[in-house]
Image (cartoon, rainbow, N blue to C red):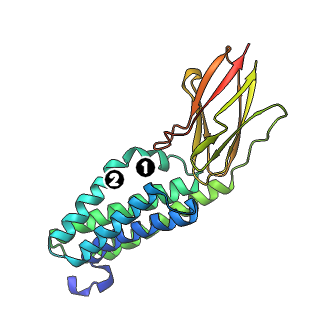
Amino acid sequence: MAGDTPARWTWHRLSWLAPVTLGVLFLLVMVTLAGGFEPFLFIFGIIPLIVGFVGRRFPRRAGPITVLVVMALMIFINVETIIQDIAHPESFWNFAIFGITALTLAVVGLVAAIATLRSRGDNPAPRVAYAAGAVIVAAVVVSGIATLGLEDDVSVAGDLRVVAEDAEFSPVAVSGSGGVGVFIENKDPIRHTFSIDALDLEVEIPGSTDRRVEISAPAGTYEFFCAVVGHDDMKGTITISG
């Protein structure tokens, strides 16, 4: 019976609580990771919060419809990023937080909104809530283990040094001759890549991890970049002399 379901786990409550939790999560990440205002995280924090409050204020149709549409749009718009994130459990923030946790909360909000609109009984709601919690805990554990198992590469004398920090590569340009060793320091807690299309090269750099790569290529100037979705400004060049 619907009346036997604890009030805290009704479909309606799940439908607005999931986006509110998602919004709070992104805002907390903005404060702890970005250390201040970051437009992307702020937008993806504020929108779910507003949607959650609308869902709570208008429980009949307007609220659940708003939650359903916005959660579906957030999943659709970010599907490429989500796929990338969940493919890399060794980067904790990408996999456990931006990937699994954010996706789980969005899906729970969407499913609960549909159930609310269809006036379905509330008995399955607690199971959905507990299953979502279990998925998130499992993701945190798996990614935590994978992250702790990472080891940094070691720099070699003469290596060119590239630093990834605040989603930017610095310095913008580095140069060397002959076989070039490049040591990439990722000072961000999120994953990046060191990619050069002209050389068919892509080095995965988990959050807060250092990687080293040897480049042997003809003389010329090569553009390197980060292939992670949304990191379009992370570019630089390596000039190799003959």
Query: Which residue type carries mark 2?
Result: Ile
Q: Which residue is mark 2?
A: 75
Q: Is residue 1 visible?
A: no
Query: Which residue type carries mark 1?
Result: Ile
Of residue 130 and residue 7, the one placed in the foreground of this image is 7
* Residues at discs 2 and 1 in contact (Cβ within 8 Å): yes
SS type, badge 1:
helix
Instruction: Compute the Cα span from label 2 to label 1.
Output: 8 Å
98 vs 120, left or right, is right
Residue furthest right as drawn = 157
Q: Which residue is mark 1?
A: 82
139 vs 170, left or right, is left
76 in relation to 138, above or below: above
Residue 130: percent from left, percent from top:
40, 73
Q: Residue at x 50, y 68 (%)?
A: 28
SS type, badge 2:
helix
Image quarter of residue 21: bottom left
Residue 66: percent from left, percent from top:
22, 64
Q: Residue at x 66, y 52 (%)?
A: 208
Residue 153: percent from left, percent from top:
75, 42
54 vs 36, left or right, is left
User: Quadrant where the N terminus lies?
Assistant: bottom left
Circle 2 Cα neighbour tier, 10 Å, few/some/many (<14 / 14–19 / ≥20): some
Image quarter of residue 140: bottom right
Q: Earlier in the sequence, mark 2 or mark 1?
A: 2
Q: Which mark is residue 125?
A: none
91 in relation to 231, above or below: below
Of residue 173 and residue 112, the one placed in the foreground of this image is 173
Residue 18: percent from left, percent from top:
35, 69
